[in-house]
Amino acid sequence: MKQAIALLLTSGALGLGGATFAEAAQASVHAFVFEGPAAGMAAQIWTVSDDDDEDENEGRSWFGSDDDDEDSEDCDDEHDDEGGCAAGGVGNAAPAGSVAPPKNGLFTDGTAPQAQTN
Amino acid sequence: MKSLFAALALTTAIIAPDLATARPITLTTNLAQYGEPGAYLSLYVTDASGAYVGSLWMAGGKSKYYRHLSDWARLTGGDVAQVDGITGASVGSGRSLELTMDLADALFDAGYTLHIDAAAEDMRESPNEIAVPLTTKGAGQPVKGRRYIANFSYAF
């Protein structure tokens, strides 16, 4: 019986200890997230993380790794790669059929090239 | 009745030269089996002095990659407006791009050259892969490419 009571007390103490630790951990998380300096950190991390993503994209981007340095000049770094570089998006050429061809003297006015891929 | 014929003759005289200034032409670019996803291609024209005249087509929609079409980019300063309304999808390995357009007659037998720059993912740039003088005699004669393009030809 004494052993059973001792066991109960021990497990109870462990359980309470665990709960206390969990609360403490939660409290520390909240403190990190919501305190002023921590909020600043979070913003900084977002920026760094964003840059990392861009680097990863450049690493597996078109035209080989030898162009990674030049990628800093493309629209990835202008922060408009989300749609900005999509076909027909801002900064891209207007797709055929959406606007008239350029008046460069090569085409007859009013006619547009027709493309077919086989 | 006489006045009707006169009007008809006059309108024909006005319209006919316009029709004569352009001809329908088909440009066929057959890509080699280079084994990678779609190639970007720029088709453009230079005059007898090598000066850029204009673009005929851009295969590939993302302007961020146009700099890899390096001769085109150099000649145009990377001006995306040059290919507004004449841009389509990139062309896959082993596939064929067929373009039909009305081109000015004055381009033929007058020292103009049609160029094609090419580039593809993780592969080398291939500026001026095709450079073919625009002549009436050259129609229907395939020109071999170097890397991405198996051959190119134009026909009236």
Image (cartoon, rainbow, N blue to C red):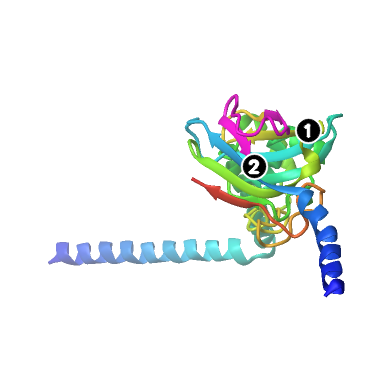
Please say whether residue A68 is visible from this viewpoint: no
Q: Which residue is mark 1?
A: B109
Q: Which residue is mark 2?
A: B156
- Contact? badges 2 and 1 (CB < 8 Å): no
Residue B13 against residue B47 in the figure, above or below:
below
Q: Which comes before the other along the chain, label 2 or label 1?
A: 1
Residue B147 against residue B77 in the figure, above or below:
above
Report in which chain the residue with disc 1 lies. Answer: B
Q: Position of residue B13 (x, y in %)?
A: 84, 58
Seen at 71% across and 57% down, the residue is A111
Please say whether residue A59 is visible from this viewpoint: yes
SS label for mark 2 = loop
Q: Position of residue B123 (x, y in %)?
A: 58, 30
Residue A22 against residue B81 in the figure, above or below:
below
Residue closer to the observer: B15 or B86: B15
Q: Position of residue B81 (x, y in %)?
A: 78, 52
Q: Which image quadrant is residue B139 in?
A: top right
Work out which residue is located at the far left of the displayed protein and give it: A1
Q: Is residue B142 left or right of residue B50?
A: left
Seen at 12% across and 67% down, the residue is A1
Residue B133 inside the magenta-drawn segment: yes
Residue closer to the observer: A11 or B59: B59
Residue B94 against residue B18 in the figure, above or below:
above
Graded by Cα atoms within 10 Å as few (under 14), some (14 to 19) or many (20 or more), the crowding at tag 2 reads few
Residue closer to the observer: A56 or A95: A95
Q: Is residue B77 left or right of residue B123?
A: right
Q: Amino acid at mark 1?
A: Asp
Residue B23 inside the magenta-drawn segment: no
Q: Amino acid at mark 2?
A: Phe
Graded by Cα atoms within 10 Å as few (under 14), some (14 to 19) or many (20 or more), the crowding at tag 1 reads some
Q: Which stretch appears magenta?
A: B128-156
